[in-house]
Amino acid sequence: MASQRAARALTPLTLALLISQAAIVVTGGAVRLTGSGLGCPTWPECTPGSYFPVENQIEGVFHSWIEFGNRLLTFVLVLFALATLIAVLRSARKDLRPLAAGQILGILGQGVLGGITVLTNLHPLTVAAHFLLSIILIAAATSLHSRRKGPTVRIQVNGRLNSYSRFHVMWAGLVITLGTIVTAVGPHAGDRDVPRLDLRIPEITRIHSLSVYILILFSIIYYKHKEINILTKRRLRIFFGISLAQGVLGYIQYFLGVPELLVGLHILGSTLVWIAAWRIWLSVQFKAKEIAQ
């Protein structure tokens, strides 16, 4: 049946959507780290009169193609999002429709916000907002992929376990938000003439580091909670490993003067940390729906 084929297609499609959402964050970081943020100085055109890079652009052809490549990836993302929405509709998965439709709306919002970012000459706050919207879309794509195999229901989680679950995912989001502030202060602005936030790098970096310490420590406390299930424990172990590696990488890049390659890896790491944190939250808050025979 068509609905069964569509249901089977959800596995590769939601995975491709999640990978694409993460990839666009990494390529966006590459744009900033190579100083290509204004490689396409207009929007939606790349340069006045052309949607594609042209020779002799002010920022140089290399920077133009880096920025243009990131824009092209958005179209790949749109294709996967549309294909996922169609599969969700054909599979009669009503529980996934808001998530799938939200991907389309979020990507459109990213396009508008990306244009505002270019038109404001890469203001650090608009760049940070661009990243944080991606984090929201990544969470939704993670939910889509995690719930793809069958209907799920929200669990009534009470007491301390519910508090632990909410605090963990919210604090992980705070850590990532503080990371965007560190980025907005740091040297990799996307273009040499872009202003930075008027904050001291050592102080904001220490605050970010402290938030990471708290997150890792709380993850250990969370792991020892007597009511968490086996799946949550496994995902917490994965989360702890990724977070620890991310913390070590953060220190190395700081003491080496934030080299571009390590910063790029740190951006990838922050995405993986967030996906891992969201999967932990899902494992506590949702379970497979029992289907009557």
Image (tube, rainbow, N blue to C red):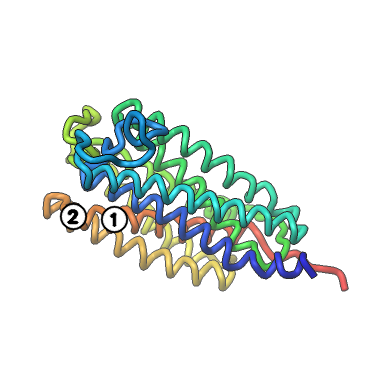
Horizontally, is 51 left or right of 18 in the view? left
Q: Mark 2 = which residue?
A: 253
Q: Residue 58 location in percent, x, y?
A: 19, 33
Q: Is residue 241 visible?
A: yes
Q: Residue at x 35, y 53 (%)?
A: 26
Label tally: 2
Q: Secondary structure at mark 2?
A: helix
Q: Residue 174 location in percent, x, y?
A: 41, 44
Q: Residue at x 46, y 56 (%)?
A: 20
Q: Secondary structure at mark 1?
A: helix
Q: Quadrant of residue 130?
A: top left
For label 1, the crowd category at 10 Å Cα-Cα, with few meaning under 14, some 14 to 19 and many 20 or more, is many
Q: Quadrant of residue 114?
A: top left
Residue located farthest toward the right when viewing the structure as drawn: 293
**C-alpha distance separating marks 1 and 2:** 9 Å
Q: Residue at x 24, y 53 (%)?
A: 263
Chain-order first, disc 1 or disc 2:
2
Nearer to me, 82 or 65: 65
Q: Residue 24 location in percent, x, y?
A: 40, 51
Horizontally, is 63 left or right of 125 in the view? left
Instruction: In the rendered view, tell whether residue 212 sits above or below residue 123.
Output: below
Tag 1 and tag 2, C-beta contact below 8 Å: yes
| Amino acid type at mark 2 | Gln
For label 2, the crowd category at 10 Å Cα-Cα, with few meaning under 14, some 14 to 19 and many 20 or more, is some
Q: Mark 1 = which residue?
A: 266
Q: Residue 212 location in percent, x, y?
A: 33, 52
Residue located farthest toward the left when viewing the structure as drawn: 256
Q: Quadrant of the N terminus?
A: bottom right
Q: Is residue 156 visible?
A: no
Q: Residue at x 58, y 58 (%)?
A: 282
| Amino acid type at mark 1 | His
Residue 208 got which mark? none
